[in-house]
Amino acid sequence: MTDEKCPEAFISLAERLADTARGIVLDYFRQDFRVEHKADDSPVTIADREAEAAMRAAIAAAYPDHGVIGEEHGAERPDAGYVWILDPIDGTKRFVTGHPQFGTLVGLLHRGRPILGMIDMPAMEERWIGADGRPTRHRDRRGEREARVRACAGPGDAALYATTPHMFEGPDLTAFERVRVRAGMTLYGGECYGYGLLASGFADLVIEGDMGVYDYLPLVPVIEGAGGRATDWAGAPLDLNSDGRILAAGDARCYAAAQALLTGA
């Protein structure tokens, strides 16, 4: 997080985008609809496509010169100074099986760097908002508060999240296992929710592999605004060219130890 504040107008638009997506996806949640499969065999629904289309329309109306990169409808003006990153349903497999732990991700890049991010959990009525120059905020049924990571001396004390162990193969699986066997506890599932729990001080590490830009870029400002760190496994900042392997941690000591284990340092 930098000292320069993200404009309030961008935060307000991100809120509207998440509200719009929430209304659409909840209309379809636990209803009868067709599930299709993309080329990579991942599921997609009319809810994914309608929600992203509606968010894109709102961005075009407010800032027609901004770019958009979305999971379902591709990239428009990806070289613009400001580029929005959209994932209408993060956790589509959970969504189509009636599980409430799916999210909507909204992010904004300025000259390639994440400056605004939002994790919205429509069925759970929770939202995390992170933006440059501002502390991350968490909102749920009990109100809104500042989100802060918790102290954690190292992986042995850590609650580690990963979406699934099946996202790690070959050398990546070996690297992940070096952290997992030392972790205090390891939990799978939750997709973007694990990052929100990390930001709020209920988890300590999230390690992922094979993520798309719409999966990880909106998470960076949320984690950083709560006092944590999110990078690739090598420790480099996350951007549009990252390889999709993500390490997020709340405590700098835990981050350093996990990063050393991942890289075999």
Image (cartoon, rainbow, N blue to C red):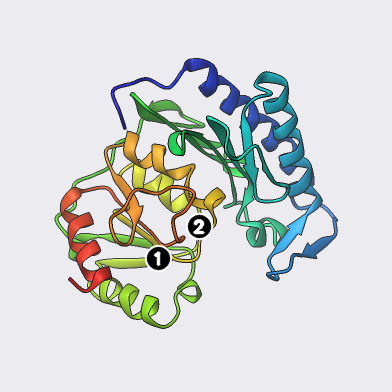
Amino acid type of the residue tagged 1 in the rendering: Leu
Residue at the spot x=76%, y=53% of the render? 30
Amino acid type of the residue tagged 2 in the rendering: Gly
According to the image, label 1 marks what residue?
187
Q: Is residue 41 above or below residue 246?
A: below
Residue lying farthest front? 79
Q: Is residue 92 above or below residue 228?
A: below
Instruction: Please tell me how crowded label 2 is: few (under 14), some (14-19), or many (20+) other residues with Cα within 10 Å.
Output: many
According to the image, label 2 marks what residue?
190
Q: Position of residue 105 (x, y in %)?
A: 56, 42
Q: Is residue 66 above or below residue 101?
A: above
Residue at the spot x=65%, y=37% of the render? 77
Q: Which quadrant: the N terminus?
A: top left
Q: Which quadrant: the C terminus?
A: bottom left
Q: Is residue 202 visible?
A: no
Q: Position of residue 87 (x, y in %)?
A: 62, 46
For residue 221, which quarter of the picture?
top left
| Mark-to-mark CA distance, 2 and 1 | 9 Å
Q: Is residue 166 above or below residue 244?
A: below
Left or right of 108? Residue 69 is right
Residue at the spot x=85%, y=59% of the render? 34
Q: Badges 2 and 1: C-beta atoms under 8 Å apart?
A: yes
Label 1, secondary structure: give it: strand
Instruction: Please tell me how crowded label 1 is: few (under 14), some (14-19), or many (20+) other residues with Cα within 10 Å.
Output: some
Q: Is residue 29 visible?
A: yes
Q: Position of residue 56 (x, y in %)?
A: 71, 34
- Residue 2: give its label: none
Left or right of 45? Residue 212 is left
Left or right of 29? Residue 136 is left
Label 2, secondary structure: give it: loop
Q: Position of residue 190 (x, y in %)?
A: 50, 57
